[in-house]
Amino acid sequence: MNFTGANILSVDQFNRDSIDEIFAVADAMLPYARRQKRTKVLDGAILGNLFFEPSTRTRVSFGTAFNLLGGEVRETTGMESSALAKGESLYDTARVLSSYSDVIAMRHPKSGAVAEFAEGSRVPVINGGDGANEHPTQALLDLYTIKKELAYHGHAVEGMHICMMGDLKFGRTVHSLSRLLALYPNVRFTLISPRELMMPDSVMDALANAGHQVNVTDQVSGSSDADIIYQTRIQQERFTSPQEADQYRGKFRLNSEIYTKHYKPNTVIMHPLPRDSRAEANELDNDLNQNPNLAIFRQADNGVLIRMALFALTLGVADQVKKYECDVNWYSDKRNV
Ligand code: NCD
C-alpha cells in the first residue's frame, strides 16, 4: 500500500505487508514517545483534530502523536460548537478545514461519516471512529499489543484463541479488530455476548470467508484455553434509550475471581477503554489492576506509537524521522520504566 497522501478509513485497506510496515515504523517511534529523543520532522505541519463524539485517549493520543513528531494540533470538539450544527454538509466542512490542516483525524457518531468527509478533503483523513462502524487505529494498536503480549509468552497471532466479550453489536473496536485478525491464519474466536448484542453478520461473514473457527455463546465458561480476553463496554450512546442499555450493563463482568476460574494463567486481558467502573456495570474490575496480564494501559501507550506511525507514513516522512532528531533537555526518566 502506498501510504503517502492516503486516507485511513477502514481496516479493509490493509494486508499483512502494510500492517508490518506500520508496526515497523511504530517500533521506531519508541525513543520519541519515551522522551529519550525528540524529532522535529513535522515542524510546521498542522493536524486538524475533529472529534464530534466524546473521547479522551483517542483524541489526546492523536494530538500527542502529532506533537511528538514536531507538529501543531488544532482541535474542534463537539458538534454543537461547529458549523455542522448550522446544517453545513460534511463535504463543505471538509473543503474548508482541509485548507487549514495538513492531515485530519476525525471521529463522528454516524457510520460512514468520516468516509463522506474524506471525499471533500484535500488532505489525508484518518478515521478515529465512525458510529458503530469502524475504529481502524484502535484495531491496529490492539493488534500491535496482541503481538507484543503474545511474543512475551513465546506465542504468535497465528493459531491464537481470542475471546471478545460484551457489546459486540455496537462496539466498533471489535468490528475492526476482527476484520484485521481475519488476515492471520488459524485464529480461533469465541464471541461472548447477550443474544441481542451479537457480532453483526457482516463481520461474521468476513470471519467465515477467511476460514476462521468462530464459537458464539452467552456463557463465560468454556474458553479456558483463550490467549486473549478482550472485554468491551456496553455502548450506551448507540441504544435508543439509557434504560435499554441498562438491561445489559453488568451482564458480563471480568474480575479476579472470574478470571482465575475461567481462564488459564497468563491469558492477556484487554479493553479499548474507557471501562465503565460504575457499580452497576464494572465490566473490568479494579481488583485486576495489579495482574501483570492486564494490558489495558499498555494498549493506550501503544496507541501513541501507532498514531505517530500513521502520521509519518501518510505525510511521507517515515524515513526522515531520525534525520530531524534532537536532544531532550528536561527530566524524563520515569517514562522509561
Ligand atoms: C472505544 C470507542 O470509542 O469506540 N474507545 C476508544 O476509542 N478507546 C470504546 C468505547 O468507547 O467503549
Image (spheres, rainbow, N blue to C red):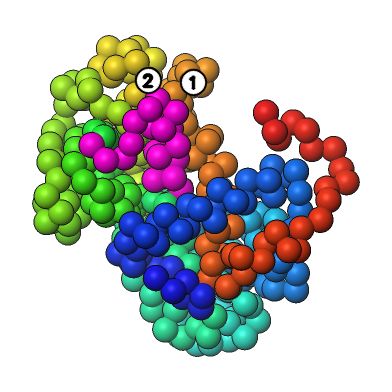
Residue depicted at 35% across the width and 46% down the height: 235
Q: Earlier in the sequence, mark 1 or mark 2?
A: 2
Q: How busy is the neighbourhood of tag 2: few (under 14 within 10 Å), some, or many (20 plus)?
A: some
The quadrant in which the C terminus is found is top right
- Please state the horizontal and vertical placement of residue 170, each as a whole percent of the image: 29, 51
Tell me if residue 258 comes above or below residue 90 in the rendering.
Answer: above
From mark 1 to mark 2, how far is it between C-alphas? 8 Å
Residue depicted at 48% across the width and 34% down the height: 296
Give the residues drawn in magenta, as a range. 141-159
The answer to the question of whether label 1 and label 2 lie on touching residues, with beta carbons closer than 8 A, is no
Mark sitting on residue 309: none
- Answer whether residue 161 is visible to the viewer in this image: yes
- The three-letter code of the residue at mark 2 reads Asn
- Magenta stretch: helix, strand or loop mostly: helix
Q: Is residue 202 left or right of residue 283?
A: left
Q: Is residue 84 left or right of residue 334?
A: left
Q: How busy is the neighbourhood of tag 1: few (under 14 within 10 Å), some, or many (20 plus)?
A: few
Front position in the image: 17 or 132: 17
- Please state the horizontal and vertical placement of residue 43, each as a whole percent of the image: 75, 69
Mark sitting on residue 266: 2
Element assignment for label 1: loop
Residue depicted at 32% across the width and 13% down the height: 260
Q: Which residue is mark 1?
A: 292
